[in-house]
């Protein structure tokens, strides 16, 4: 069965610094996708970045990049140059091509300090 | 505009009074899912559906029912709500094999 682990319930980072949010996953399917979502205090879920298991390069979207280490089954989110608006809950998720179901981790609450 | 629409957005109800939270998507997505979010527990899946008339239990299906009679709609039914079902509920949809999943705005449900 699929499983997502996010071991950091909460993180603090100073404004303008980079931060890494950890995510490890477990699946027996060789083909899968990995996702990160942001949930600000207003509650909506905002898609940030996607990485396919066969993608050769790490995904990047603006200040977001995904540090994908397939052998370690990790998909860490890196946010560069943190901004106050980055303070939010962050969820890692996975979908495998066999089950096609989306599974989410418990989330990490990021607080950016001025 | 591509969207997932949930209703109601906010509801306070009493124990035992049946309620339905509707979910509709206009993107012709095959996959739809319901999650509940509780502090410290993240998003837990209640039910999901891969297509019309195909539904499966997620991690926390007890106390909930769903149906998928049409592709666009995936209602969540609480036959006899209890206070432990007080939560924030999200509906989501995706193309089969898609590289993103679209969320509704969430439904805050309080059962007293």
Image (cartoon, rainbow, N blue to C red):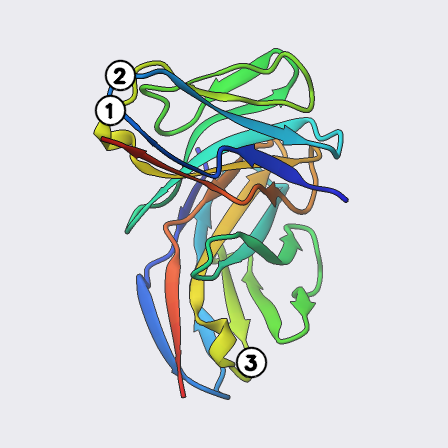
Question: Is label 1 on the same chain as label 2?
Answer: yes
Residue B16: which disc?
2
Q: Is residue B80 above or below residue A3?
A: above
Image quarter where the C terminus of chain A lies is: bottom left
Spatial CA distance of label 3 from label 1 is 43 Å
Q: Whole-percent x and y of residue B104?
A: 57, 41
In which image quadrant can residue B38 be found? top left
Mark 1 or mark 2, which is nearer to you?
2
Is disc 3 placed on a helix, strand or loop?
A: loop
Q: Is residue A99 visible?
A: no
The answer for which chain carries disc 1 is: B
Q: Whole-percent x and y of residue A40?
A: 47, 62
In which image quadrant can residue B15 be found? top left
Q: Whole-percent x and y of residue A59?
A: 67, 64
The answer for which chain carries disc 2 is: B
Q: Which residue is mark 1?
A: B82
Q: Which residue is mark 3?
A: A80
Closer to the N terminus: mark 1 or mark 2? 2
């Amino acid at each position: 069965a699929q499983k997502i682990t996010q071991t950091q319930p909460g993180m603090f980072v100073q404004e303008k610094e980079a931060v890494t949010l950890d995510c490890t996953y477990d699946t027996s399917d060789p083909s899968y996708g990995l996702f990160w979502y942001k949930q600000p205090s207003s509650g909506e879920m905002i898609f940030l970045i996607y990485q396919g298991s066969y993608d050769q390069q790490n995904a990047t979207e603006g200040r977001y990049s995904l540090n994908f280490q397939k052998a370690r089954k990790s998909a860490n989110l890196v946010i560069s140059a943190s901004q106050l608006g980055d303070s939010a809950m962050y969820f890692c998720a996975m979908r495998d091509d066999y089950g096609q179901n989306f599974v989410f981790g418990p989330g990490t609450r990021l607080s950016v300090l001025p | 505009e591509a969207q997932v629409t949930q209703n109601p957005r906010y509801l306070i109800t009493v124990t035992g009074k049946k309620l339905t939270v509707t979910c509709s998507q206009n993107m012709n997505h095959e996959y739809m899912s319901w999650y509940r979010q509780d502090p410290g527990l993240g998003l837990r899946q209640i039910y999901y559906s891969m297509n019309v008339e195909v539904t499966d239990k997620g991690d926390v299906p007890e106390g909930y029912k769903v149906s998928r009679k049409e592709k666009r709609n995936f209602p969540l039914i609480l036959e006899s709500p209890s206070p432990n079902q007080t939560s924030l509920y999200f509906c989501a949809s995706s193309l089969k094999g898609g590289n993103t999943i679209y969320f509704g705005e969430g439904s805050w449900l309080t059962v007293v």
